Image (spheres, helix red, strand yellow):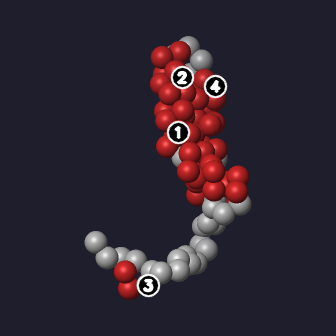
Amino acid sequence: VWVAVAFGLRYVSLASLAMGATFPVVAYVRSPGAPTFVIGCALLAALIIVRHRANIQRLVQGVEPRMGARKTVSPGSSPENEHAL
């Protein structure tokens, strides 16, 4: 799922979200007799979605960068300071 979405749509964050959303479904299909495992996978999926809130907002706004896109330098910063600690 991750590879298909990432290389098909070129959004790493969307690929991670899609993978997280399908994770409990795949767990259920592969292990229907293991409800604890499926519940654990569902909790991990929820964690993935919660941790990607900012990415979801950028996707909705249409400003999420695509995989392979060049980074832009924001006004007031210089490229030399991008890697400073």
Quadrant of the rendered image containing residue 58: bottom right
Rate crowding at label 4 as few (under 14), some (14 to 19) or many (20 or more) other CA atoms within 10 Å: few
| Dot 1 or dot 4, earlier in sequence | 4
In the rendered view, tell whether residue 73 sits above or below residue 32: below
**7 or 73: nearer the viewer:** 73
Q: Amino acid at mark 2?
A: Val
82 on left or right of 24: left
| Dot 1 or dot 2, earlier in sequence | 2
- Secondary-structure class at tag 4: helix
Tell me the residue at 70%/52% (across/down). Answer: 60
Tell me the residue at 61%/74% (across/down). Answer: 69
Q: Nearer the viewer, mark 2 or mark 3?
A: 3
**23 or 55: nearer the viewer:** 55
The disc label shown at residue 61, or none: none
The disc label shown at residue 29, or none: 4
For marks 4 and 3, give the CA distance: 50 Å
38 on left or right of 64: left
- Give the quadrant of the C terminus: bottom left
The residue labelled by disc 2 is 38
In the rendered view, tell whether residue 56 sits above or below residue 68: above
Residue 13: % across, % down:
58, 54
The disc label shown at residue 50, or none: 1
The disc label shown at residue 78, or none: 3
- Secondary-structure class at tag 1: helix
| Dot 2 or dot 3, earlier in sequence | 2
Residue 67: % across, % down:
60, 67
Q: Amino acid at mark 3?
A: Ser
Q: Amino acid at mark 4?
A: Val
For marks 3 and 1, give the CA distance: 32 Å
Residue 47 seen from this side:
yes
Residue 4 seen from this side:
no
